[in-house]
Amino acid sequence: MYESKFLKILKGVEVFSPEYLGKKDIIIAADKIAFIDDKINYNNSYELYDGENLIAVPGFIDSHAHITGGGGEGGFHLRTYEIDSSDIFNAGVTTIIGCLGTDGITRSLENLYAKTKSLEWEGLTTFMYTGSYHIPLLTITGEIVKDLVLIDKVIGIGEIAISDHRSSQPTFNEFKRVSSEARLGGILSGKAGIVNIHLGSGKDGFLFLNKAVDETDIPISQFLPTHSGRSPEIFNQAVDFALKGGTIDFTSSTNQFPEKGLKTKVSKVIKRAIDKGVSINNITISSDAQGSLPEFDSEGKLTGYKVGSIKTLFNAFKDLILEENLKIGEAVRIVSTNPAKILTLKNKGEIKEGNIADILLLDKNSLEIDSLFSKGETIINKGEFIKENIYSF
Ligand code: ZN
């Protein structure tokens, strides 16, 4: 009998696709989910993974992470460091979208592109947004449309800052123009052409987004606003935007302020949005990993500083289920199925035959990570990180 590292069977695992499929056997062939059935015959050419007391969910998709580091507000010494692939996997994330941020001067898109390639090599699926906080946008080729069409990794633009003292204070016409270019580039390349928007705590809030939806022909699905729970004003406007059919993204690595004087966790703010009538299908969470989390006083003076952690995304998933009583499948939609949909990532965000084998096995009760498969490759097995280090040749 031949041995193959390309065939795996996950035996008797409860599958949340996100729909609950019951106890199933899953066959992974190379990087794909080949079969899902009640009981599949197999032989010893398969690597066997026992699914007893485990649930299977699709790998998480983080739509907003500063993978090359961010920050610098306050000086060079406050630039944050690059992310490590093991931190990404340990957060259950198998697909990650990198972005620049405030600093488009000492950080470059070329560096971001190289980082997406490096992480891909390490077993992740990676993409990036072109641009930074500011309009006019930084690009690699000189044009937004060309970046989307000619660069495999570029799936949109962002994070573009609006309503923030660190933004370029863009006019509505500037905002509209770059959004239309993202749309055109997306159409020509068969990608989402998503406009990922950083909402600051400034006075304008969702103004430009609402104007774009009401006054232009650009569909609401082109936009993915993030930091939706950062202030009471932003939260209420985000809820209205979602009720109009938009998708809203919440940041797991920061405290949320859905009402004056209330500081809370991302899981709680998401539950509030759901209670206000927002469909679970219109909500995503991203980590904002490696982002600088500066704190300013009322005069705009920097008073504190932290680095965003990707593990917060995994913790938010657990909190949604264990503290906010969402069903497992509902939480799966928020961290995997919905981001795959808004970013139009093919064969992602669901456990189904033919999809990429990004599968997370979790303990049924604690929801802690037991095993992780990314593009069919075993990354974590029984809690142990088995992926070879990138530097071990
Ligand atoms: Zn941001």
Image (cartoon, rainbow, N blue to C red):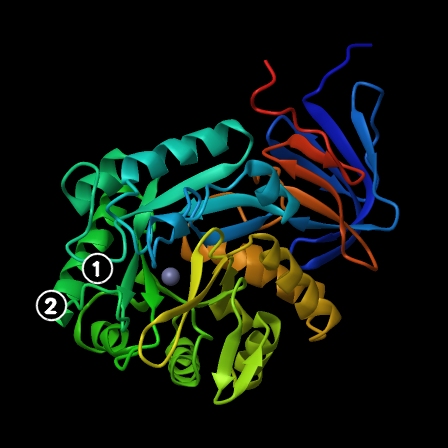
Return the mark for residue 179.
1
Q: Please name the amino acid that badge 1 sits on.
A: Ser
Residue 211: percent from left, percent from top: 21, 77
Q: Quadrant of residue 42?
A: top right
Q: Is residue 376 visible?
A: yes
Residue at x-position 34% and y-position 64%? 198
Residue at x-position 71% and y-position 68%? 321
Going by the image, does 379 lie left or right of 99?
Answer: right
Residue 9: percent from left, percent from top: 77, 32
User: Quadrant where the N terminus lies?
Assistant: top right
Residue 355 vs 78, above or below: the answer is above
**Helix, strand or loop under label 1:** helix
How many numbered marks, from 0 up? 2
Residue at x-position 51% and y-position 67%? 254
Where does label 2 land, which residue? Answer: 173
| Separation of marks 1 and 2 at Cα, in angstroms | 10 Å
Q: Ligand 1: does it lie within 8 Å of the C-beta at label 1?
A: no
Mark 1 crowdedness (10 Å alpha carbons): few <14, some 14-19, many ≥20: many
Going by the image, does 266 lie left or right of 184?
Answer: right
User: Quadrant where the C terminus lies?
Assistant: top right
Residue 240: percent from left, percent from top: 39, 83
Q: Of residues 316 and 307, which is closer to you in this image?
A: 307
Residue 270 vs 191, above or below: the answer is below
Residue 178: percent from left, percent from top: 18, 57
Going by the image, does 362 lie left or right of 270?
Answer: right
**Helix, strand or loop under label 2:** helix
Q: Earlier in the sequence, mark 1 or mark 2?
A: 2
